[in-house]
Image (cartoon, rainbow, N blue to C red):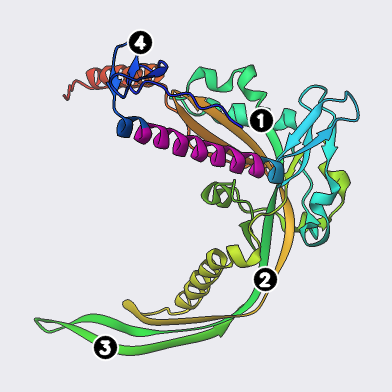
Amino acid sequence: MGVIVYKCINCGGPLAFKADTQNWTCDYCLSEFHEQEVRSFINNEQAEAEKNTEIAHELEQEFQENAVGYSCESCGAEIVTDDTTAATFCYYCHNPTIIPRRLEGEYRPEKVIPFQINRERATELFINWCKKKPLLSKQFTATSELEKLSGIYVPFWLFHCSPFGEISGDATKVRSYTRGDTRYTETKYYRVLREGKAIFRDVPADGSRKMDDELMSVLEPYHYKDLTDFSMSYLSGYLAEKYDMDQNDVYPRVSEIMRKNMSTLLRETINGYSSVSVKRTDVKLKNVEATYVLLPVWMFTYQFKGNTYIFAMNGQTGKIAGKLPISKGRASAWFGAVSAASFAALMIGGQFIW
């Protein structure tokens, strides 16, 4: 049975019941409380303790469910991963670790594009990209920072479908001509209608909640001719994630992209008019299929003045995307140099503009 200790509401010291006053008194701050105050305080303390215990239990349960430990076969260190990590490496000896059962059954990818850019080349491309950014902090490309560059196989869904679409609207043809001393403008009005079919293949959508959808989309396109049958061997030495968003989760995002693209294709067939105003669009997506694949991405996360910046590189083509932190010192120096150069050019030309 637990021991109950009555504590002072004001200072936290022990309370003692005084028989003469029938109240509780603190010998440290000399505060005095009647029975109802003490009971109310105790009830609040117990409720808070129970709440904290419940939260701690939930966090422990979540950790037990999602965090899994593995022993490194090389050095014996404990490797802890979450429930979506399929491949990682030991942070002590860098021995690659693949977790096969994370990619079994429905989580086994059909295809993979292997990394075609190694770490050394990725670092070189990243540094060259940064050199073209004059306002970037020099610390950004420090060796210690670039060690955080990680190769990750990101889960993607590639959608294929055969859309059928219709668009209709109004169009005009305007012609101007002159007869004698009079200038005429002739406007003809038309009702336009277009319909057609198309085939869309390999429309991508990342299947990881951890990844920034916009960042992943900027890395496109991948060359899907390099897709090969999935093998665990491709994961060795890299990180890998399994999807936590299935094809139904990402379909609304992809279907919107395919509908817009189909509408654009139909709109581009309306030519020869002075103006076109589309009034109605109807696109139906048919024979929709999805293929689960892993695509290579080099990721780099950078902390700068309390903000987190995430950068990504297409591990096949080397295309880079991300928002850069601006160094105020370098920005001031750069703008100062630009201003000085502009001033010199204007003086040579005999002009000075404020």
Label 2 near label 1: C-beta < 8 Å?
A: no
For residue 27, the mark is 4
Residue holding disc 3: 188
Residue 344 percent coordinates (x, y): 28, 17
Name the N-terminal-most of marks 1 and 4: 4
Amino acid carrying label 4: it is Asp
> In this orientation, which residue lies closer to the viewer: 71 or 203?
71
Which is in the foreground here, disc 3 or disc 1?
1
Name the N-terminal-most of marks 2 and 4: 4
Which is in the foreground here, disc 2 or disc 4?
4
Q: Magenta stretch?
A: 39-62
Residue 76 to residue 207: above or below:
above
> In this orientation, which residue lies closer to the viewer: 213 or 63?
63
Residue holding disc 2: 160
Residue 44 percent coordinates (x, y): 40, 36
Residue holding disc 1: 149
Residue 169 to residue 80: above or below:
below
